[in-house]
Image (cartoon, grey):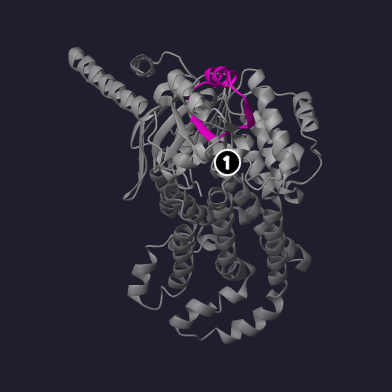
Amino acid sequence: MKVVYNNLIMGIKVNDIQVADLTKSFGNTKAISDVFFNISPASITGFLGPNGAGKSTTINILLGFIKAAHGIAKLSGDKVSCNNIKALKDVGFVASNPTLDNNLTVKQELKYFAKLTGKKIDQKQITSLSHKFKLDLKAKIDNLSNGNHQKVALLIALLGKPKILILDEPTNGLDPLVVAEFKRRLFDLRRTGTTVFISSHILSDIEDICDNFIFIRSGKIIAHKSKSDLKKLSPTIISLTSDHVSDIIFGIKSAYGDKATITVPEETKLQITLTDAINPLLKVLAKFTVSNLQITSESLQSIFMNYYKGTETPQEDDDIAQAHFALAEGKKALKSTKKDKK
Amino acid sequence: MHIFAKTLKTKRLMLFFWCFIVFIVNLALIQLFPSLKEAFASLTANLPPSLEAWFGNGLIWDSMKGYIGMEIMNQMSLVAMIFAILFSLSIFAKEEQSGLMLTQLAKPISRKSYFWQKYFALVFALVIFVIVFYAGAYAGMLILGDTSLSLLDLWQPAIATFLLCLSLSSIAFSITAATASESLAGFVSAFLGIVGYFLSSMSSTAPVIDTLSRFTPFYYYNTPNVLEQGLDLKNILILLAIIIIPLILSLPIFARRDLKTR
């Protein structure tokens, strides 16, 4: 963490999106507080939290739409500010319910935004993108459905092949077919090296496409986990029937110690909850006659719900504590550098 | 220049509609001159100064120059001011309210560039509008066969009308840019325009009204009468100051403030 923070200060490109210590208030309401995360290139990161958690505020700061009270945000190593257009050079953005110019046709809209990117974009790219998204270039924006409207917004974001794609609840109001297509496009983009940062308050919309998840609640980051880490957190529940319950319990205790929770609902029935690998258990069970074996896993959804409700005390806490320590250290280092210069 | 061009393109119907209206109305107003001339010249010959402010004096109704000064420059300028304010609000405030500004500023476009391109689109639209405004009056004169004024004679009132419209629309534009408040911008600019119009019309009736009217752009528009005495350099400078100062003040605020993110 220290290294990351110091690199952030020194301007060394480490990650595509770097956010440190971001704080923003609206009047007396603190929208976000000490938000800290880094996102590595060519990944899809889900930014999750309930409504009003601070997702859009963070994104608006990332794009320079609003100013942070303090903290740093960098895109591809360039510090974000209201007027640093360099930071937005390789960024595509789709807002939740994006606004487009209803007076124009899809083609006119795309051509206009292509010019705004400041890159040479030929007609072929526009045609090929619209073909992929099955969009009629001659259709007037005003006459498009919600789904097609969103597709145009995504196309606008993709013009000029951005390195970073920031999406603020992009699947709002879209039907499942469009959502599925949308996800396919995001996968394609990641494959070609694009970093995708996608916010949502609906886990199921983005669960299957994200490599990493950042959870925000009440303006604070409460967890930053990879998908595999999250899966490890989800316990496996095994229920079975056997005449050798006491022997099985002994075997499980020897293999897992406290990592397994065992309940005996009936004399011959057993329910085991594991937060560790299942293989040792299978080895134990192989020695006995077992019937009605059922293995279920708690869904990611329930883990997310725990984060949402605030019942989880996450890693998070350790990692966050470390991040804050690193921040404090970074600040100290900065102050001492300034003093030395003086 | 993309934002400039696109702004004009998307607002072309609004511009066309207003241009068409003022062209027809000004053309029609000029057609009324012969019939009004006789009736009003005798009616207004002996009016007291307070009523002259509203209805004009006999001299005004006696010539095309006086009539254009009264009907086109003064009365129709109210329509021109309304257009200027509405156009200004529609190209900036409405884009921010709707979120379209964010879609554009998510691209590598600086806020200063956005500000100036929008402003120059406003200036360009007003130039077109004012040309059509006086072209309507001139076309009316041609239909009447009145050659007392040439097209060149109308350039000075056209500049005065342009500066008046630009001053009010710059105030509206600047307030929007600085505060994102369409209602505040609309209220302040409309208040200055309409109140200024009425105060200036009545300025000869009471000294206090004359003093008050000096705080509005309208006072510096046609006092003294532009068609009779030509453009007044002092008035032009004051109107230019009213145009430039709000822009200078609002640009740095817009460049740094939080945008409306809905």
Residue A317: % across, % down: 35, 30
Residue A286 lies in the magenta-colored region: yes
A56 sits left or right of B245 in the view: right
Quadrant position of the N terminus of chain B in the picture = top right
Residue A258 lies in the magenta-colored region: no
Residue to which mark 1 is pinned: A169
Q: Is residue B224 visible?
A: no
Residue A42 vertical position relative to residue A49 in the rendered view, above or below: above
Name the foreground residue: A111 vs A142. A142
The residue stretch that appears in magenta: A270-298
Residue A90: % across, % down: 57, 23
Q: Is residue B125 visible?
A: yes
Give the residue displayed 46% in from the left and 55% down from the top: B181
Name the foreground residue: A2 vs B194. A2
Residue A168: % across, % down: 56, 39
Name the foreground residue: B240 vs A21. A21
Residue B148 vertical position relative to residue B172 in the rendered view, above or below: below
Residue B178 vertical position relative to residue A133 in the rendered view, above or below: below
The quarter of the displayed image where residue A41 is located: top right
Name the foreground residue: B244 vs B98. B98
Instruction: Name the amino acid type tagged 1.
Output: Glu
**Number of labelled discs?**
1
